[in-house]
Image (cartoon, coloured by chain):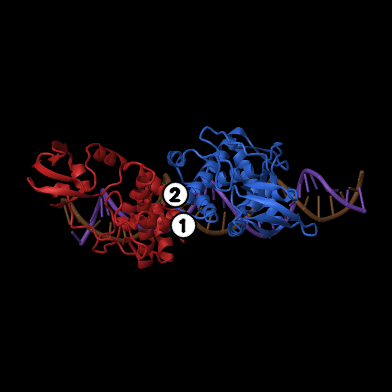
Chain colours: A blue, B red, C purple, D brown
Amino acid sequence: MPSISKEDYLKSIYKFQNENGDSVSTADIAADLDVSNAATSDMAKKLAAQGFIKYEKYKGLKLTGKGEKIALNILRRHRLWELFLIKVLGLSWSEVHREAENLEHNTSEFLIDKIDELLNFPEFDPHGSPIPQKNGEVPKLPDMIPLSKAVEGKRYQIKNVHDESEDLINYLTKLNLVLNKKIKIIEKLNFDNSMIIENDGENITVSEKLTNSVFVTKI
Amino acid sequence: MPSISKEDYLKSIYKFQNENGDSVSTADIAADLDVSNAATSDMAKKLAAQGFIKYEKYKGLKLTGKGEKIALNILRRHRLWELFLIKVLGLSWSEVHREAENLEHNTSEFLIDKIDELLNFPEFDPHGSPIPQKNGEVPKLPDMIPLSKAVEGKRYQIKNVHDESEDLINYLTKLNLVLNKKIKIIEKLNFDNSMIIENDGENITVSEKLTNSVFVTKI
DNA sequence: CTACAAAGTTAAGCATGCTTAACTTTAATG
DNA sequence: CATTAAAGTTAAGCATGCTTAACTTTGTAG
């Protein structure tokens, strides 16, 4: 069992990994975990020594199969807890991330499986992100585009919010731009890349930062 | 906020404190937490420096008001989680202690209050132990005696199980000697202090170790 | 009341995980 | 293709929390 710190590093590496299998930079991890680059270099050596990542000096970090398994397991815990806290304890969308962050490292496999069962083996968490299953499989997301790439006049459905910032989530909740919501693009404004969209029959203006974090499918 | 280790020490000191306000010995804490006496001495200094305990060399440890507040808060978390895991997630009596042990240090006040609310502000946990309330008050236990002190021919009700060992709990569950159960003392055997009791209309023999851990009230 | 065992403390050392400061490598720019 | 800024690494040091070994205090039995 890796330590809590190591779990956090593995989770972060997973987060920055893309489909191409490129290595992840030390700086990205360091910024994400709010530690120094030095700490990340240090940890990289340890993770590599234990076979969780492949690591070559100056060449970045890459999860091994073993490392990815751990990362997926943490994500599974995190996302199941988020869903559980919302569904069972009535916490709000914006409250759950922080709580799950604490709980994910301190929950036995046994308990997580119980939660999974109670929730009837869900595939997606409250942000629309896939919940890795007990067997390690990751449910497939639909083909999505960032809202910023959506086309004027067309209708879309919100399928994922790619950001964990509490401020963003609070703001989305306030605008009632929640998961699976259907919206229509009224106008894209070129000068600041903001967008006017129709939601609940009303027109609202949303910033580029928001449209980059919200992913949608065309209806 | 004290660290997880410090929380464990404070919890342990609380556990060994009696009503007389005697100091708790280093060795008791060390044994309870499965660390060396040296580690306990060391920690005692740190806890004292931060005002959580009163500590004089060779004279034992004693919680201050501030330290007791922390200890009660941890107990509150622990016991609420235990009850929650049984009631909501359907875990068994014997499974919850270990899980709660992990969760108690990683749950925000906010989340614990939500759990408290969902459970409708319970006063006792599944072992019959009082759950410290949000305001710091500790619900009063009834006047109990250990089952070992019970009198032949009389009837009693199980009110508390003063032990967290999984083996004991499993055994009690198997015998259906659960909280609030009513039993009758048939016979006390002097040679090994075991006891024959009637439960569910059947006579069973229970050891001294068991009768010392189960607390009852006379009916 | 002394001596001795048990309990407790101190000291040195180790692992983990972080910091800052100094240094090295990489890669982009003119 | 040389220079240089950015990215990454190493080194030294610190805090926490533990260990074992050596030592001190306490309290009890003779």
Q: CA distance from mark 1 to mark 2?
A: 17 Å
Residue A170 x %, y %: 58, 59
Label 1 residue SS: loop
Image check: B80 left or right of B212?
right
Taking the spot 59% from the left edge, 44% from the top edge, the residue there is: A129
Is residue A38 among the parts visible in the rendering? Answer: no
Q: Nearer the viewer, residue B21 or B75?
A: B75
Residue at mark 2: A88
Residue at mark 1: B108
Image check: A68 left or right of B31?
right
Type of amino acid at the residue the image marks with label 1:
Ser
Taking the spot 26% from the left edge, 62% from the top edge, the residue there is: B22
Residue A81 x %, y %: 49, 47
Type of amino acid at the residue the image marks with label 2:
Val
Where is residue B168, by image quadrant? top left
Is residue B208 among the parts visible in the rendering? Answer: yes
Taking the spot 62% from the left edge, 39% from the top edge, the residue there is: A141
Image check: A155 left or right of A124?
right
Which mark is in front, 1 or 2? Answer: 2
